[in-house]
Image (tube, rainbow, N blue to C red):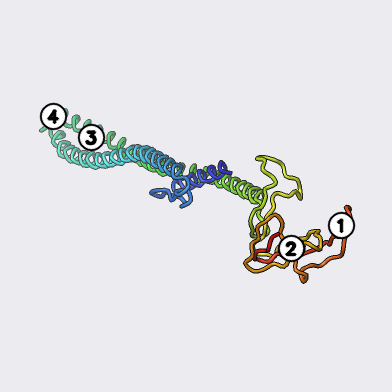
Amino acid sequence: MRESRGKYLSLLATIARLEAEADGLPDPKFPQEVITEDPESAQDEQRLFSARKSSLSEQAALLRDQALQKEQELAEQEGRQGELDQAHKLKKDEHDLLEPLVKKGVTPRLDLIRVQQQMQDLRMELQATKMSIPRTKVALREARRRVEEKITAFRAEAQQELNRKKVEVNAVAQTLTAEADKVTRTEVRSPVKGTINKVLVTTIGGVIQPGQDLMEIVPLDDKLIVEAKIRPSDRAAPRLGGDGEGHRLRFFHSRWIAGDPLRHQRGYDRRRTRGELLPYSFAHG
């Protein structure tokens, strides 16, 4: 039963840890019986909780860093898009200024071609930046989702283990109840309050038969009735405060004796008598 009790308390400590992990609590709340009877299990589960929580925090922090990198990358791309757009507009203005001058022969045509090439490069880079922004946004959402998934998976795993442990602790609780019932049924309780006169069974691990006498008990809170075969001459009247020690107690005043004469096998005329022992001493002979 002690082993089952230890297993039961250990499971309660584990359940407290798993509940804290599944609910995202800062610390487990161990039952008082675990803290009192099995503090080592509570300490072990507290250390395990701290270690698992620290591991989860590190993994979540790594994923958050990845999400942060995607945020910075998106911000850079959006900023670069604005710069490219502005640069393209400036080149467009320069192109618009050079084009009539080239037509008039004032400016070499090579300058116009150079500006047109620069505008083309800016358009291509701007287009590439615009196309990369949606991909970065998707990657950012994915990175954020991985953080949430990691925490959710951790709690779901704890919840699954919690469900298994609850089933197990219920089974152990039923076993404890059955074992406690066995222990209760092996306890022998006296039906009366009294003093043990003689122990009849002393063998450790012995088998007791149904109805077998285990000990003799003299009741303290009840009347003690004695049946005996005595000679009429052995009658004596008890007196209050008399000495009750001796080889033979002479008792049974006539008003206490009830019975019929009985012929003893040796020829003595005896009476089967039944008397009540009162709480005072008797004279002795």
* First in residue order: circle 3 vs circle 4: 4
Instruction: Choose between 135 and 201: the one closer to the eye.
Output: 201
Mark 2 against mark 3, which lies toward the viewer? Answer: 2
User: In 3D space, how far apart are the residues under numbered discs 4 and 1 (Cα atoms)?
Assistant: 164 Å
User: In 3D space, how far apart are the residues under numbered discs 3 and 4 (Cα atoms)?
Assistant: 18 Å
User: In 3D space, how far apart are the residues under numbered discs 3 and 1 (Cα atoms)?
Assistant: 147 Å
Where residue 203 appears, as percent x and y from the top left, is 67, 40
Q: Quadrant of residue 58?
A: top left
Q: Amino acid at mark 2?
A: Ile
Mark 3 against mark 4, which lies toward the viewer? Answer: 3
User: For this view, does 86 lie left or right of residue 207?
Assistant: left
User: For this view, does 94 lie left or right of residue 167?
Assistant: left
Label 1 crowd bin: few (<14), some (14–19), many (20+), radius 10 Å: few
* First in residue order: circle 1 vs circle 2: 2
Q: Amino acid at mark 3?
A: Met
- For the residues labelled 3 and 1, say whether their Cβ atoms are less than 8 Å apart: no
Q: Which residue is mark 4?
A: 108
User: In 3D space, how far apart are the residues under numbered discs 1 and 2 (Cα atoms)?
Assistant: 24 Å
- For the residues labelled 4 and 1, say whether their Cβ atoms are less than 8 Å apart: no
- For the residues labelled 4 and 2, say whether their Cβ atoms are less than 8 Å apart: no
Residue 138 appears in the rendering: no
* First in residue order: circle 3 vs circle 1: 3
User: In 3D space, how far apart are the residues under numbered discs 2 and 3 (Cα atoms)?
Assistant: 127 Å
User: For this view, does 19 lie left or right of residue 88?
Assistant: right
Q: Amino acid at mark 4?
A: Pro
Q: Which residue is mark 3?
A: 119
Q: Which residue is mark 2?
A: 225
Residue 194 appears in the rendering: yes
Q: Which residue is mark 1?
A: 268
Quadrant containing the N terminus is: top right
Mark 4 against mark 2, which lies toward the viewer? Answer: 2
